[in-house]
Image (cartoon, grey):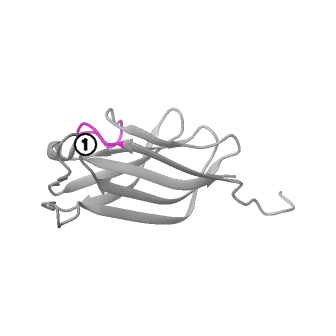
């Protein structure tokens, strides 16, 4: 048992674009690795999903769907949480969708990662996931 509490030593942020549609929530095949735990493990504070578009269009229009958050232990995927994407017609005056989930007790052991995917073809390569946390 530790004699002193562990505190975050190195703040971390990592991002990934969510690509193709996921069709299997037990053995997913189209996840993006967003965050990998550090050598002593990591704490995840928040996961943010923001609609963004590259190229010549800044309009990131989304359709209703889901974002899946998995914890991967190096071998097995574990569905951990789901975020609901709503339909938003973004424009120069209407921002794209932004989702945020905060976690008080999401600790990742060494070798684990946060991987994410999404459920609708139209949202592919529009939804960008960011994990905010720290190494222990």
Residue 99 coordinates in the image, percent (x, y): 33, 63
In the image, 73 versus 38, the foreground residue is: 38
Q: Quadrant of residue 24?
A: top left
Does the magenta portion include 21? yes
Identify the residue at horizontal 25%, vertical 54% (top origin).
Answer: 66
Q: Which residue is mark 1?
A: 54
Residue 83 coordinates in the image, percent (x, y): 32, 59
The tally of labels here is 1
- Residue 133, compared with residue 76, is above or below; it is below
Identify the residue at horizontal 66%, vertical 47% (top origin).
Answer: 41
- Residue 116, compared with residue 96, is above or below; it is above
- Residue 113, compared with residue 63, is above or below; it is above
Give the prevailing secondary structure in the magenta stretch.
Answer: loop
Residue 62 coordinates in the image, percent (x, y): 17, 54
Quarter of the image for the N terminus: give it. bottom right
Query: What range of the chain is rendered magenta?
Result: 17-27
Q: Find numbered disc 1 in the image and state the secondary structure of the residue it sits on.
A: loop
Horizontally, residue 72 falls left or right of residue 41, namely left
Q: Quadrant of residue 5?
A: bottom right
Horizontally, residue 46 falls left or right of residue 89, namely right
In the image, 16 versus 81, the foreground residue is: 16
């Amino acid at each position: 048992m530790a004699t002193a509490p562990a505190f975050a030593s190195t703040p971390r942020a990592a991002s990934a674009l969510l690509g193709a549609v996921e069709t299997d929530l037990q053995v997913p095949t189209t996840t993006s690795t967003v965050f990998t735990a550090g050598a002593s493990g990591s704490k995840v504070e928040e996961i943010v999903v923001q609609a963004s578009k590259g190229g010549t269009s800044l309009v990131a229009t989304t359709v209703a769907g889901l974002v899946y958050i998995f914890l991967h232990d190096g071998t097995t995927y574990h569905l951990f949480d789901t975020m609901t994407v709503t339909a938003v017609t973004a424009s120069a005056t209407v921002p794209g969708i932004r989702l945020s989930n905060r976690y008080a007790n999401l600790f990742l052991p060494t070798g684990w990662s946060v991987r994410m995917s999404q459920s609708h073809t139209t949202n592919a390569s529009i939804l960008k996931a960011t994990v905010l946390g720290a190494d222990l």
